Amino acid sequence: YVPYWTFDAATQSSYRGERGTVYYETRTVMRDGKRTTQRVARVRWRAVSGVVARGFDDVLVLAARSLPPAHTDALEPWDLAAMEPYRPQYLAGFRAEGYTVELDEGFNVARAKMDRVIERDVRFDIGGDRQRIHHVDTDVSNVTFKHVLLPVWLAAYKFGGKTYRFVVNGRSGRVQGERPWSAVKIALAVLLGLILAAGVGYLWAMQQV
């Protein structure tokens, strides 16, 4: 069992930014000695401001340093609604790791996750075709947390003299980890891509003649 922190919070964010509306201008250019017209995209910006609110429930943060967060993050989503209150018998026959990421550090990670969601909310609230965000001020309240243990299978295998680790979500079976890569196959794929690109470029050039 791997330790996690989960955080709940209510947030209200005031922002300042700009809403961009795309419009098109037609201009005349000379191409191959011929006069032709083309449409050029322009953006008209307008200053905006507003407030967005978002409640967060069970923002999950890994509380151990023994596993790469990139691997454990990929095991989400977890069925957190099915969690049970702690009982010692649940851990019988299994290893349970203690947390090594302190609560304050875990909350900082959770805040970063919240901020990314809030940024999406702000962009949606700004609207338009494009958005610029100049400033966001977020008030966080009603923060609560839980320390939970989630079932993760850990395994490793050797290939070509190197050890590769992978993890499995013990609830859903989702797998994430390291895998060997063939340098020869990657080089051949890159070479094939270059050949195809050159072929397409040649055909396009012939059509322009």
Image: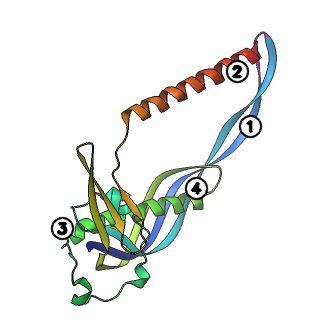
Residue identified by numbered label 1: 24
Q: Nearer the viewer, mark 1 or mark 4?
A: 1
Left/right placement of residue 84 relative to residue 129 reads left
Q: Nearer the viewer, mark 3 or mark 4?
A: 3
**Residue 90 picture quarter:** bottom left
Q: Main secondary structure of the magenta part?
A: strand
Circle 3 — which element? loop
The quarter in which the N terminus is drawn is bottom left
Q: Specify the label residue 48 is tagged with.
A: 4
Residue identified by numbered label 2: 204
147 drawn magenta: no
32 drawn magenta: yes
Q: Position of residue 193 (x, y in %)?
A: 54, 29
Circle 1 — which element? strand
Mark pair 3, 4: CA separation: 43 Å
Residue visible at 39% across and 65% down? 75
Which amino acid type is shown beneath numbered disc 4?
Val
Mark pair 1, 4: CA separation: 22 Å
**Residue 188 versus residue 182 in the image, above or below:** above
Mark pair 3, 1: CA separation: 55 Å
In the image, which residues are magenta? 28-33
**Residue 192 versus residue 155 in the image, above or below:** above
Mark pair 2, 3: CA separation: 58 Å
Q: Nearer the viewer, mark 2 or mark 1?
A: 2
Q: Earlier in the sequence, mark 2 or mark 4?
A: 4
Q: Earlier in the sequence, mark 3 or mark 1?
A: 1
* Color encoding of the figure: rainbow
Which amino acid type is shown beneath numbered disc 1?
Tyr
Q: Position of residue 140 (x, y in %)?
A: 38, 72
